[in-house]
Image (spheres, rainbow, N blue to C red):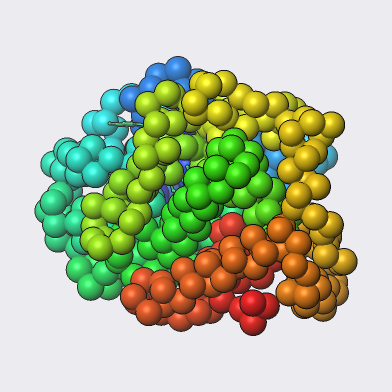
Amino acid sequence: MNFDERLKNVSVVGAAGKMGSGIALLLAQEMTRQKLLPENKNSIYRLHLIDINEAALDGLHRYLKAQLVKAAEKTTVMLRELYKDREDLVENYDIIGAFVDDALSVVRLGTDLNAVKNSHMIFEAVVEDKNLKVDLLKKIDQLTDSNTFYFTNTSSIPISVLNGEANLGGRIIGFHFYNPPAVQRLVELISPDSTRPELKEMALELGKRLRKKIVFANDIAGFIGNGHFLRDGLYAIKEAKKMAGEFTLPGALYIMNKVSQDLLLRPMGILQLIDYVGVDVYHCISETVASYIKGEDLKDDLLAQMVERKVLGGQYADGSQKDGFLKYEKNRPAGVYDIEEGEYKMFDPNGWSGELDRKLGDYPQGTIPWRKLLTNPKREEKLSQYFKNLNASDTLGAKLAKAYLKKSKQIGEFLVETKVASSAQDVNDVLLNGFYHLYGPINDYV
Ligand SMILES: NC(=O)c1ccc[n+]([C@@H]2O[C@H](COP(=O)([O-])OP(=O)(O)OC[C@H]3O[C@@H](n4cnc5c(N)ncnc54)[C@H](O)[C@@H]3O)[C@@H](O)[C@H]2O)c1
């Protein structure tokens, strides 16, 4: 069965989650575009969106509707071509409305797993729990025919483990979207030797259709993205603990977050990123990767404590940030969690946090916020000048930033040495496209 045939009946399991909902949106658009082609006029397209959380499915319906409108508004020229035979559609809003209606007529939302039975492509995006994923894959495989292909969004579990334990005979591939799937360009593709060649080809075709940048990662727990993110985040937490005697733990966490954003020129500080992904998700990645990779310290008890206290980060249904390591006001960090006190210590520019800012010292000349550099046509030149100035500076902030950059580079090189990534370019591509860094970790800046 070829790719286009498979694309006529697709299921997403875990569809109401953060990742599942974005994957559903992308698939709904592509399946609708296919449905509108003259040669597919008589075909039925079905996208089954399955989740155990019924209330979240209501939210998914609203999300899809709103996002389909936005997506259609951006592609009216292409949609006009698809609807060229529909003389009744004159204005842009007619075309947009028709596309949204057509897309929503493709989707079927529900809690019943039996809906997968005629699907030949199944996307798995349930929580990061190996036993849950294996049980679910086994169940689905009994409901579907023996030719079904699985695309798992696991962030850290080796694909060969899922393939072996669920007994899928190579019909599973790691198709690792980044968060949020509709926005992030990157997909990490994990195709171990066990994966059937025709599935790998289909995954590449899917990547093209969804306009994703594909980077291959080898089948080692955490892959490239989380292989870097996990070690990078643990470094910050462990450094903060070392500095806690001098600055208190909340103070040291504040410092590491600030240095990783302002002086590494990243889109957000490392603790803000952990909160964005979810402290529980990050903890889960750490536990999973640590269970497969021995001889390396890939855990920290602060993470377990945060999860135990239910200080979890993540997002509310409207996309705003929940409190985690940091407290957020209007989606901006405004405080830091004090694990000893069990409460947030609010930033105080005229008090403790202002004092820490002074201790970090002046920023090197040429420090530009990430957002401004992102679109700057002279970005490479500006980066190179900035890092020269950073290297020449010996403020506390500059010292911490240089040590952090070295660590990040070391992690990148380690991923190449241990064959998680095939090249330095692949590591850099993942950080540039999946994390929106301005430069790859393997660079000559440090
Ligand atoms: N959050 C991220 O930034 C991110 C990024 C890349 C990959 N991932 C991976 O994507 C997957 C999903 O993560 P998420 O962050 O979207 O999680 P999430 O908790 O937001 O969503 C998981 C969804 O799965 C549903 N679910 C749980 N058990 C189910 C079952 N038995 N049947 C059907 N649905 C079930 C839940 O109700 C929930 O809606 C995980 O494997 C995660 O590691 C997450």
Residue 397 at least partly seen: yes
Q: Nearer the viewer, residue 360 or 291?
A: 360
Q: Residue furthest top?
A: 55
Position of the C terminus, as image quadrant, is: bottom right
* Residue 173 horizontal side relative to residue 31, left or right: left
Task: Residue 439: give x, y in percent of width and height.
Answer: 66, 70
Task: Residue 315: give x, y in percent of width and height.
Answer: 56, 31
State the image quarter where residue 13 is shown: top left
Residue 120 at least partly seen: no
Residue drawn at the location 66% of the way across and 47% of the way down: 255
State the image quarter where residue 402 is shown: bottom right
Whether residue 273 is situated above or below residue 380 in the rendered picture: above
In what quadrant does ligand 1 lie? Answer: top left
Q: Nearer the viewer, residue 393 or 66?
A: 393
Residue drawn at the location 64% of the way across and 60% of the way down: 400
Query: Exactly how many numbered labels are in the figure?
Result: 0
* Residue 211 horizontal side relative to residue 117, left or right: right
Task: Residue 345: give x, y in percent of width and height.
Answer: 65, 26
Whether residue 432 is situated above or below residue 70 in the rendered picture: below
Q: Nearer the viewer, residue 37 or 203?
A: 203
* Residue 410 horizontal side relative to residue 246, left or right: left
Position of the N terminus, as image quadrant, is: bottom left
Whether residue 327 is situated above or below residue 41 in the rendered picture: above
Task: Residue 410: give x, y in percent of width and height.
Answer: 49, 72
Residue drawn at the location 82% of the way across and 34% of the way down: 349
* Residue 422 horizontal side relative to residue 338, left or right: left
